[in-house]
């Protein structure tokens, strides 16, 4: 099975900061990668799919990049609503999530 | 509006059974594969099972293979998860999720609100 590893596990940042989260796959997944945001008590929300495509309605400060085994989610200017946990997911041949990155207030 | 609503969660003893339901509205349920995903307390999501649009194909995670059964009734726009021989490690919030494009291998763009299953004596 393909394993997805995120880093860091926790990230402390301030409003306005540029934030980058990394996701590594144990083997190439081409660009079959999604990013989700989850807030406490809520379901995950799709942000990015196919590594870099922005889901409808998601603010443009979110962007994704990468291919093969290394991917990044970038928030260009962190907003108060962005403090949450973020997960990557591989969704081709199987469905595997990373362990999550919690973005907390510094 | 586009919606998935789960129900049927609760507290159950180890070894017992439980059936979850997921009611769909606002999209063409009968043409979409649908997944079950679970999330144990403090953990990341874990894929559980998927069923094809017509119910003819079903796939399971190894951790639930042989104990859980996914099914659907397209006339009722409803998805089910029959969970037998429950274990403590099955304790989680269970979500149903629809993939973009309706194909198995799409990102999960519609999620339910989740239903909590607690397996405890």
Image (tube, coloured by chain):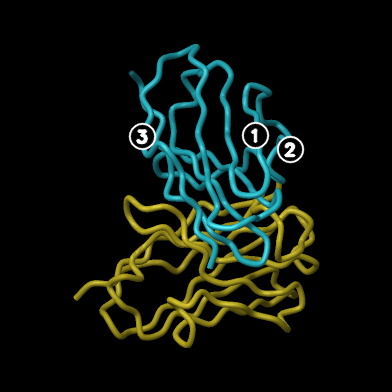
The one of B23 and B64 positioned closer to us in this rendering: B64
In the depicted structure, whether residue B121 falls above or below residue A21: below
Circles 1 and 3: CB distance less than 8 Å?
A: no
Please give the letter of the chain rendered in yellow.
B
Q: Residue B46 in the image: x percent, y percent?
A: 47, 61
From the top left corner, tell me how far across and down residue A56 is, in percent.
74, 35
Q: Residue at x 51, y 74 (%)?
A: B61
Q: Which mark is residue B40?
A: none
Vertical position of residue B31 compared to residue A48: above or below: below
The residue most toward the left is: B121
> Chain under label 2?
A
Q: N-terminal of the two: label 1 or label 3? A: 3
Are callouts 1 and 2 both on one chain? yes
On residue A53, the disc is 2
At a point 71% along the width and 80% down the height, the residue shown is B55
Check disc 2 and report its element: helix, strand or loop.
Answer: strand
Q: In which image quadrant can residue B8 be found?
A: bottom left
Q: Colour of chain A?
A: cyan
Asked if labels 2 and 1 touch by Cβ distance under 8 angstroms, the answer is: yes
Q: Between disc 1 and disc 2, whose residue precedes?
A: 2
**Which residue is more in the foreground, B9 or A92?**
A92
- Considering only vertical position in the picture, is A45 above or below B111? above
Q: Chain of mark 3?
A: A
Labels 2 and 3 touching (C-beta < 8 A): no
Circle on res. A64? 1
Q: CA distance from mark 1 to mark 3?
A: 19 Å
**Could you tell me which residue is drawn at 74 percent across and 38 percent down?**
A53
């Amino acid at each position: 099975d393909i394993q997805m590893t995120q880093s860091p596990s926790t990230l402390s940042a301030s409003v306005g900061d540029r934030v980058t989260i990394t996701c590594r796959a144990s083997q190439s997944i081409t660009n079959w990668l999604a990013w989700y945001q989850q807030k406490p008590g809520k379901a995950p929300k799709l942000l990015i799919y196919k590594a870099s495509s922005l889901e409808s309605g998601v603010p443009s400060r979110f962007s994704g990049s990468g291919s093969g085994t290394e991917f990044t989610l970038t928030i260009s200017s962190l907003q108060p609503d962005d403090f949450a946990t973020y997960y990557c997911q591989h969704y081709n041949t199987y469905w595997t999530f990373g362990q999550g990155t919690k973005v907390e207030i510094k | 509006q586009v919606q998935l609503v789960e129900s049927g969660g609760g507290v159950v003893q180890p070894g017992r059974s439980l059936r979850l339901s997921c009611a769909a509205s606002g999209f063409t349920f009968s043409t979409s594969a649908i997944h079950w995903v679970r999330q144990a307390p403090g953990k990341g999501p874990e894929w559980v099972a998927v069923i094809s649009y017509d119910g003819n194909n079903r796939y399971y995670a190894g951790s639930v293979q042989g104990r859980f059964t996914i099914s659907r009734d397209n006339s009722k726009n409803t998805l089910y998860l029959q969970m037998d021989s429950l274990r403590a490690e099955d304790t989680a919030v269970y979500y149903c999720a629809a993939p973009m494009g309706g194909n198995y291998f799409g990102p999960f763009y519609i999620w339910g609100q989740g239903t909590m299953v607690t397996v405890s004596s």
